[in-house]
Image (cartoon, rainbow, N blue to C red):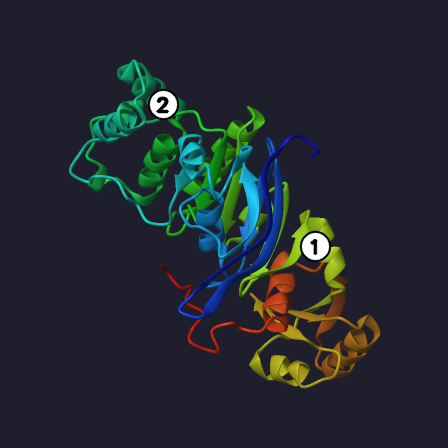
Amino acid sequence: MNGEPIIEISGLTKAFSGKTVVDHVDMTVSRGEIVGFLGPNGSGKTTTIRMICGLLKPDSGDGTCLGYDIRTEADRIKLEVGYMTQRFSFYEDLTIRENLDFVARLYGLTPRGDYVDSTLGQLGLTNRRNQLAGTLSGGWKQRLALAACVMHKPQLLLLDEPTAGVDPKARREFWDEIHELAGNGLTVLVSTHYMDEAERCHRIVYIAYGQVVARGTVPEVIADSGLHTFVVKGQSGAALARRLRERPGVDQVASFGNDLHVVGTDERLLEQAVREVIAGTGARAEPDETSLEDVFIRLMGQTADNFDGNGGTEARP
């Protein structure tokens, strides 16, 4: 998309306790885009999102969000952004409607009841409006959180791993709603660990240990990886996988049901390794498309952990 830039950041850097969590990150997101922000745990996604919306000040770098300076106009940014965190943060002893009424009060929305009723209808919550939030399933809690984020009609929606712990049906419905909102001009930056969700984004930005290491559409990121894939069918198992991993030209071997997905950067060496290992086993091999997951595993392996093996936990302020 080539629309108006909603997020423009350059060189954002943030450190906690001497550890650099975000290391000179650049990013541009245009109006109406859904951009996936991906990376392993502790990679700096949450810290970057908090700097974008004005909850944290960067140590260096600058940028704008919705045309406002992220350093000096944070209060104005917060009024026009919806931010959905990983953890459900609403009152479990209040009903859905009471929670939304509370949020409407915080934003000073008037007439408050009209905003609440409209949002209940938009997110399919009307029939459950009197249900206590604490009794909701993960999918309905997620829907309530999204309703609270969009009730004040923000221009930008920041979603920090919003579907963690939610069943596949609820995740699909959530993403259908996100695309509906984006179709009406809302801009979305979403962090996720799910590859199927990444593939539903217009573009993706992959960050590993504080540094952006890949960006573009999903086909662009896969093509730029230089990876090739063969699928071995008919004779899988741990022993065959071990033999493949020992061969030059093989970077990754993963089991998918009865098949093995074998990945490498040198197509000739990869095919030679696969053909030689399966010879006489009755298995067959054929080239296949490289998956986004294969690319991300390779990117993780190529990037140094900035926490020196402490588990990759992202530092908190």
Residue at left offset 32%, top offset 34%: 144
How far from the left and from the top, in percent, is residue 157? 47, 36
> Badge 1 local density, few (<14 within 10 Å), some, or many (20+)?
some
Rendered image: mark on residue 221: 1
Residue 233 in view in this figure: no
Residue at left offset 64%, top offset 68%: 298
Left or right position of 12 against 115: right
Up the image or down, 241 lies above or below 114; here it is below
At mark 1, the secondary structure is: helix
Q: Amino acid under label 1?
A: Val
> Badge 2 local density, few (<14 within 10 Å), some, or many (20+)?
many
Q: Earlier in the sequence, mark 2 or mark 1?
A: 2
Left or right position of 121 against 177: left
Up the image or down, 85 lies above or below 79; here it is below
The residue under label 2 is 119
- Count of residue discs: 2
How far from the left and from the top, in percent, is residue 95? 20, 31
At mark 2, the secondary structure is: helix
Q: How far apart are marks 2 and 1 (CA)?
A: 37 Å
Q: Which of 163 and 239 is in front in this view?
A: 163
Quadrant of the rendered image containing residue 125 = top left
How far from the left and from the top, in percent, is residue 282? 71, 77
Q: Amino acid under label 2?
A: Thr
Quick one: quadrant of the C terminus?
bottom left
Quick one: quadrant of the N terminus?
top right
